Amino acid sequence: MTLTKKMLVKSIAKDVGCTHKKAADILVVLLQTIQQALAEKESISIRKFGKLYVKTQSPRWVTHPLTGRQFLTEQKNIAKFKPSKYFENCLNIFEWSSGNLVNKAILEQIYELIENAEIEDLDEDESMYYPGKALRY
């Protein structure tokens, strides 16, 4: 499901406790500010969310798939988003903590394997060596 502007306005109005018109105005101003900052090639960092920035794509040669003719594209600016570690962790935690029965069954199997695992101390001569690293099992 895609989150639309209308849904965002409804959520802001509910959480803040204001009218839908006021929430729509807030959202429009926020989006215009972000758009204007990116147009001026400024980066936007929002703590615990991520970073929006502009990357310049240099000209390159491309081939038309039907005609086979090659031509040079123009240089263009592209908006990029890099999520924060906190944001990525929230996505992964949400995925596993959802009520999905398959995820729950997998987690239960992992916990059971951890509880039943036997850890043995190995002598130095029994350890496995890889180039540049010594790993003990």
Image (cartoon, rainbow, N blue to C red):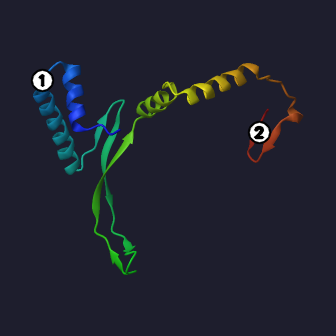
Vertical comparison of 24 with 18: above or below = below
**SS of the residue under disc 1:** loop
Query: What's the CA distance linking mark 2 and mark 1?
Result: 63 Å
Residue at (31% x, 43% y) in the render: 52
Residue at (36% x, 30% y) in the render: 48
The amino acid pointed to by label 2 is Ala
* Front in this rendered view, residue 134 or 102: 102
Residue 1 rendering spot, x and y as whole percentages: 35, 38
Report whether residue 126 is seen: yes
Q: Where's the C terminus, which quadrant?
A: top right
**SS of the residue under disc 2:** strand
Which residue is the site of mark 2? Answer: 134
Q: Mark 1 packing: few (<14 Cα in 10 Å), some, or many (20+)?
A: few
Extreme residue toward the front, this view: 101
Residue 62 rendering spot, x and y as whole percentages: 38, 73
Which residue is the site of mark 1? Answer: 19
* Front in this rendered view, residue 119 or 26: 26
Residue 127 rendering spot, x and y as whole percentages: 83, 35
**Chain-order first, disc 2 or disc 1:** 1
Residue at (29% x, 65% y) in the render: 75
* Front in this rendered view, residue 49 or 102: 102
Q: Tell me: 66 left or right of 54.
A: right
Residue 73 rendering spot, x and y as whole percentages: 31, 70
Q: Mark 2 packing: few (<14 Cα in 10 Å), some, or many (20+)?
A: few
Q: Tell me: 18 left or right of 132.
A: left
